Amino acid sequence: MVKTSFVFLVCVLSGFLLTIQLIAFKLLIKQATVEEPTAWKILDQITVAAQQYKIPLFVIDQLLLNYIKQGDYLHTAKSWPKNYSSKNVNHHHFSSKRKFYSDFISYHQSSNSLLSRNRECRIFCRGESHLTHLATLADSITPETVIHFGNYLKDHHSLSVITLNDIDSSLLHLNLHVSIPTHIIIADERVDIRKQSHVVHIVILYDRVQGNNWWQAPVKLNEHHERILHRQGLKKTEFRLPYSSAIYDKTEIMRTTIDGLRIFLPHPPKSFLNPLNDKKFIECDRRRSNEFYSENPKDETPEANNFGKKAQTLLTKARQLIEHELGLPFWLSSGTLLGFYRQCDFIVYSGDVDIGMWADDFKPKIVDLFSINNIPLIHWFGRPNDSLELSFLMGDLKLDIFFFYREQDHYWNGGTQAKTGLKFKYDFPKFTLCWTDFIGLLVRIPCETESYIEANYGKQWRIPQRDWDWKSSPPNVRPNGQWDPNEWSETIRLIPMPNV
């Protein structure tokens, strides 16, 4: 009897233990079959590979940066090592920052799964987009490393890697056609689109504007590239970066951990959060400039060089006061814009600097700010709501500010003849604003530069014209009435300058 009871107890206990084992086994099977989010998985593969090749990747995606701002990630972020770069790595030597690299690899190898870390993917897996934008710096990566990095992702993770190259436009004026890597686009074509495929876009940023800014090359996809992205369900409208060239303010890069991924962040991120239309960049065409100077030798006289230096100083000061202190946009206009577009320089015989502003941006403080900075007002024409034009003087060089008025189908600015009160109107096709590097300064220009210039100077703008009458020479000028003499004290102000 006792023996029978013992056997029965052993059977019950064995059955209980077997049941526990089966339940545990089912849980393990269930966990194994739960897939990590596609976005997290591909970002994990890419960021780990980037660390292996010492490529610092930082988030420049507007959508993600806005989410990140809401968290505490920047508060816990640390500055990146200054020499953290694939350029500091060779077969025999790692930089003194190798400990950071080793720590990262150890961290990843110890828990290389989102599931094993029991974490939620709160930032990178929101599912609102098929795309994540990252960036790295050209100073931190070599073209050879770009190739090895792409091959690693193909060989070890079976990812599709598109590497875009372009000609370095900053060297064209030297007749050097140097190809540089500009974009890396990565996708996993094995993922069923119904399972939310994901594409990672890495921008390689280059120094521009005397090293004060980062430049993004245009995104130039061929038909094969577009088909790959189309198969991922990615539309062109989902890009949260300009397809054209773009410019960004340099900022500090901080390293942090988000959703279990070691990643870098720009701090502050403001430049990457600006509207897309406020990032577009157009470089001066040095080939056009060289062609112009081959037919019209550059004036290298001391007087010409002196004018160029003074004009650059005046434009630099105007940029500081208007753009930085008042936070208002302005752009190169009239002869200064023509000089930029035609010869990448000032037109010496123009004798002044010309800029444009929106009339609804006018503030009386502009006059006060220039005056206290030793650039006094010398001419005031018009009213803020009609034909406003201001002229300032720094030393013996004049700055003209033309205020533009926006109509439904065109824009215009006005002019006034001081001795008669006659008004003139200059019509321009509607335009948008882009950034450019002009004589080492980051300034705005009309994106539609040539149509703007043709409106003002006609089809023959390539030919220098020293005899120019502002009241009759421009193709876009037309009479616009006359100021009543009773209004002259308000609309025609000529401020005498004291003799120095």
Image: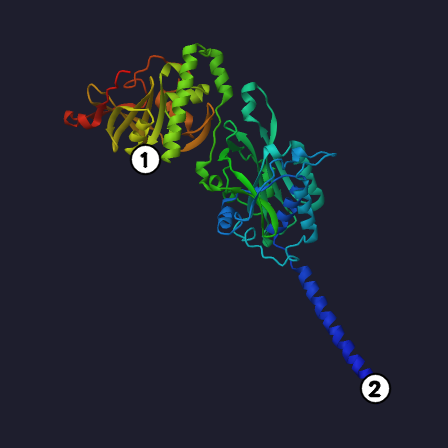
| Residue 478 makes an appearance in the image | yes
Q: Position of residue 401 (x, y in %)?
A: 32, 26
Amino acid carrying label 1: it is: Asp
Which label was assigned to residue 433?
none
Q: Is residue 500 left or right of residue 481?
A: right
State the residue at coordinates (71%, 68%).
24
Marks 2 and 1 sit apart, C-alpha to C-alpha, by: 99 Å
Amino acid carrying label 2: it is: Thr
Looking at the image, residue 342 lies above or below residue 185: above
Q: In this view, does 121 lie to the left or right of 412?
A: right
According to the image, label 1 marks what residue?
361
Quarter of image, res 405: top left
**Element type at mark 1:** helix
According to the image, label 2 marks what residue?
4
Q: Which quadrant is the C terminus positioned in? A: top left
* Residue farthest to the top, as pictured: 301
Q: How crowded is mark 2: few (under 14 residues within 10 Å), some or many (20 or more)?
A: few
Dot 2 or dot 1, earlier in sequence: 2
Q: Position of residue 435 (x, y in %)?
A: 45, 31
| Residue 431 makes an appearance in the image | no
Quarter of image, res 1: bottom right
**Element type at mark 2:** helix
Q: Position of residue 158 (x, y in %)?
A: 69, 45
Q: Position of residue 156 (x, y in %)?
A: 71, 45
* Residue farthest to the left, as pictured: 486
Color style of the picture = rainbow
